[in-house]
Image: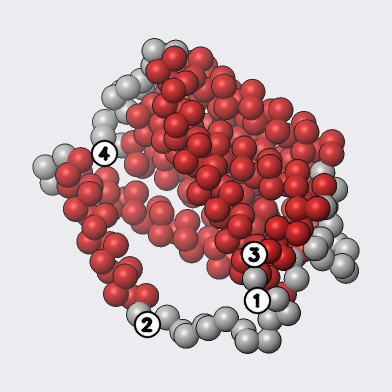
Amino acid sequence: DFPVVRLFGTVGWIAAGFVLSAWLKYGEGTFRDALVLGAIFAVLCGVYSFTLPHTPPKAEASEKFAVGKVLKMMKDPSFALFSLVAFLLLVFGTFYYNFAGLYYGNMCLKLSDDKVPLVLLCGQVMEILTMLVLPFMLRKLGMRITITLGILAWAARFFIFSFMTPVELMIAAQILHGACFAFAIAAAMIYVERISAPDVRGSAQSFLAFATYGVGMFTGSILSGKVLGHYKADFSQFWEVPAIGCLVLAIVFGLFFRARDTERVPAA
């Protein structure tokens, strides 16, 4: 059920791309306009959150300190490797999240500001289709191969970006975003859910989010900025760094990770 539910987040992302493009095209077209639009939607989401069901923690949990139980899972070498690879993948993934818009826009390919969100959301369209395929991939190929393919998709897109031309190929590279997200990131969420004991699943997902979208993207933001500065905004060399990094991650993960989502006993 998770891929189907999660893809509605992607639908929202696509809707935001269309709305933002229209907002910039028919408004003043300034960065301030984008921030105002974001603030409006943030307020709407905050108000809507008060209507969500009440879901307090279960009182019968076996341990009060659930995070401690999650950390004990690190004793399993495969889960430790999984956590490290997930962290590093988002470090390299931040190169894309922080600079893809600038790469397509004024800093490199020179697409107009209202077209850049539309180009980026091509990836989200593919994300929806790939999320629907994800359950079949997991059943046929298993967790290790599926996640490895997702990491390889990241590497492939970064390598294509480093070619710089033609523009049509750079736009077509966004097709790989579906595999990048669904096979690597969404599959990782599903894996954590499967191997965690029922009373710590929420904490395990929080740990994954902290390691990836928290510490991973924080580290990636600092590193990507320094790398772009080091290469003096030469995007060809800039994209080669995360491309090689993701390729190494895929090889290490594919060789040494052992999936435990088919075992009855959780990794803890």
Asked whether the residues under the numbered discs 2 and 3 touch, taking CB atoms below 8 Å apart as contact, a structural biologist would say no
Q: Residue at x 57, y 81 (%)?
A: 57
Compared to residue 99, the image places residue 212 above or below, namely below
Asked whether the residues under the numbered discs 4 and 3 touch, taking CB atoms below 8 Å apart as contact, a structural biologist would say no
Task: Give the distance between the C-alpha atoms of the residues marked 2 and 3, in whole angstroms.
Answer: 28 Å
Q: Residue at x 44, y 35 (%)?
A: 221
**Which residue does the numbered mark 2 point to in the structure image?**
51
Task: Give the distance between the C-alpha atoms of the residues marked 4 and 3, in whole angstroms.
Answer: 44 Å
Number of residues whose C-alpha sits closer than 10 Å to that of mark 4, classed few (under 14), some (14–19) or many (20 or more) = some
Asked whether the residues under the numbered discs 1 and 3 touch, taking CB atoms below 8 Å apart as contact, a structural biologist would say no
Q: Residue at x 75, y 47 (%)?
A: 80
**Which residue does the numbered mark 3 point to in the structure image?**
67
In the rendered structure, the answer to whether residue 186 lies left or right of residue 23 reads: right
Number of residues whose C-alpha sits closer than 10 Å to that of mark 2, classed few (under 14), some (14–19) or many (20 or more) = few
Is residue 82 in view?
A: yes
Which amino acid lies under the numbered mark 3 shown in the image of this protein? Val
Q: Earlier in the sequence, mark 4 or mark 3?
A: 3
Please, what secondary structure does the residue beneath circle 2 have?
Answer: loop
Task: Give the distance between the C-alpha atoms of the residues marked 1 and 3, in whole angstroms.
Answer: 9 Å
Is residue 190 in view?
A: no
**Which residue does the numbered mark 1 point to in the structure image?**
64
Compared to residue 79, the image places residue 60 above or below, namely below
